[in-house]
Amino acid sequence: MRSWTDTLRFAFQPVVNLATGGVAGLEILARPETGDILAEARRDPELDGQLVVLALRAAVRRETLLPLHVNVFAGTLADLGGLTPLHHAVREAGRLPWEVTIDVSPPYTHVPHQGLLDALAELRGQGFRISADGVGDGDVPLRLLVDMSPDLVKLDASLLVRPSAVRAMRTLCDELGALLCVEGVETELQYGAALSAGAQLAQGTLFAPPSRLPAAEVYLPPRSPADASPPRSGPSVREFVRPAALLPATASAGQVRALLTGSPDVSGVLLVDRNGVPFRSVHRSRFLLSMSGRYGHALYAERPAAKLGDPPRTVGIDATAWEVLDVVAVGGRDRTSDDVAVVDRHGRCVGVVRLADLVRALSETRVEEAAGLNPLTRLPGSDAITVEVDRRIAAGRTFALSWLDVDHFKQVNDGAGFAAGDELIRAVGRLLQHAATGTARMGHIGGDDFLVLADPEELAPLAAAVLDAPWTAGGWPVTLSLATVECVPGSVADHREAAACLAPLKKAAKALSGASWVVGRAGLPGYEIRRAAGAEATSTGYAVAEPGAG
């Protein structure tokens, strides 16, 4: 009599890195030929645990070096208290736990949350990565999602029609230190929406359908300018992580050679200790050159590969692309093309980044930023500021948005000449950049109008530096006016509402004589006068005044 395992097959679907276009991992999907084994596994934790082990062994038979994703029901983990058979199977297969991601699948209803969290803590302690699967179309409570602290969140593609929800999930992922993946992407329109919303990974039939053989290449639609994510200073290295080719620190040169010759896309091999910490980095070209030289194979084949390797270059998973470039810049030029190992907080390798990926992404970012810079001050335009305002609103952060301009600028231009007016604007822009601290960001809308976005506590020293400066243009004394709206979480829905709250405050500041500063609060009437000629700034409380007063 045939066993149920005789009719069970597995398919592989790539998880695609949207920044590099490469395959970041393979999800293993059970495909029973008869019956509904998955429905039975949902009710039977022991059966579900067996499926996980079988899925892993199926991937090993295909000899794929890519990181793997295996699906486990949340109830299974809570009931079994971990997956000891999976841990043994991973070791037997010669793979490492941190090369395997556990996709925790719904339902979560009636699942003991503490039991699930305890199981995840055990798996994480063994080195497995954790993914929250089916978010947005399942029943995972938001509080449980936060407590799970996953390495990856898989969001259902149906949410792409609600981009604000996807952007909010990206913000939450950033806070949790997780990557955001959209699954079920079938059309180029969904692909563009996933990019625009900030997803870093995706999977679906658009890229590659589930297949009996692991896909080495995937289809990636060409990007349009509208698809590009908003410019971000210092993009996270998480966005560029590629799978690493790992071998034990004791591997011989012959083993490394076999891996490299059988995998032409692998640019290098990392030798890791038993805990997954990088020990030596073996660069493909330098290694093969040594092995192909006269007597090279005879000399090195049975010797430890570590003798032909270099100390690994590593960065933490929370590093920025610029920090990776700093690491690459240290050392000899012959190592410029070496992969940089990305490690977690335990020092374990979670992947590598390639210099080419970083340079391309940073170049695109710089081109986009340069296109939006004001030619006079080289400050970003309003778009960069409004994008950051929306990001802070989505993150639930309190912020202060300010509008700064020159009083009676037309008269200054008419009296001193446009060249003196331009030099004044450049000087204001330079001082704003010099005075900015912390999270403050500056923008030049055009003419004599500037935007300042900062945390409320960062604004007072910046305002003092700008308003107290002795401004002149062609010998004419000049004063500036500053209007600020403080926005607490929930007070404004987007940058448009923040700008609408700021407009009457600007009018109030311009109505005051001399250097002036007024501060209002979104959703509340009136404003506080903090600076005006012949008037003392209110340092405490909230002095309410009607617009136009002063």
Image (cartoon, rainbow, N blue to C red):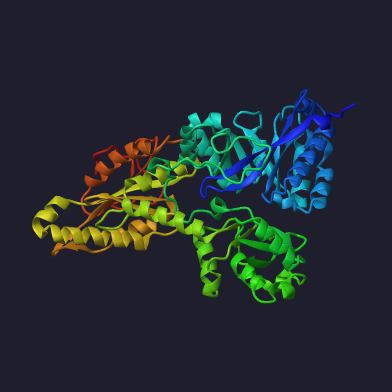
Residue 15 point in image, percent of width and height: 61, 42
Farthest residue, direction front: 294
Q: Nearer the viewer, residue 142 or 248?
A: 248
Q: Nearer the viewer, residue 100 or 307?
A: 307
Residue 511 appears in the rendering = yes
On the rendered structure, is 170 left or right of 372? right
Q: Quadrant of the C terminus?
A: top left
Q: Nearer the viewer, residue 456 or 514?
A: 456
Q: Residue at x 51, y 67 (%)?
A: 326
Residue 156 point in image, percent of width and height: 58, 32
Q: Quadrant of the N terminus?
A: top right
Farthest residue, direction right: 1
Q: Is residue 339 above or below residue 107?
A: below
Q: Is residue 450 above or below residue 333?
A: above
Q: Residue at x 80, y 41 (%)?
A: 53
Q: Is residue 235 above or below residue 311?
A: above
Q: Nearer the viewer, residue 285 or 293?
A: 293
Q: Quadrant of residue 487?
A: top left
Q: Residue at x 35, y 35 (%)?
A: 525
On the rendered structure, is 91 left or right of 236? right
Q: Residue at x 24, y 60 (%)?
A: 426
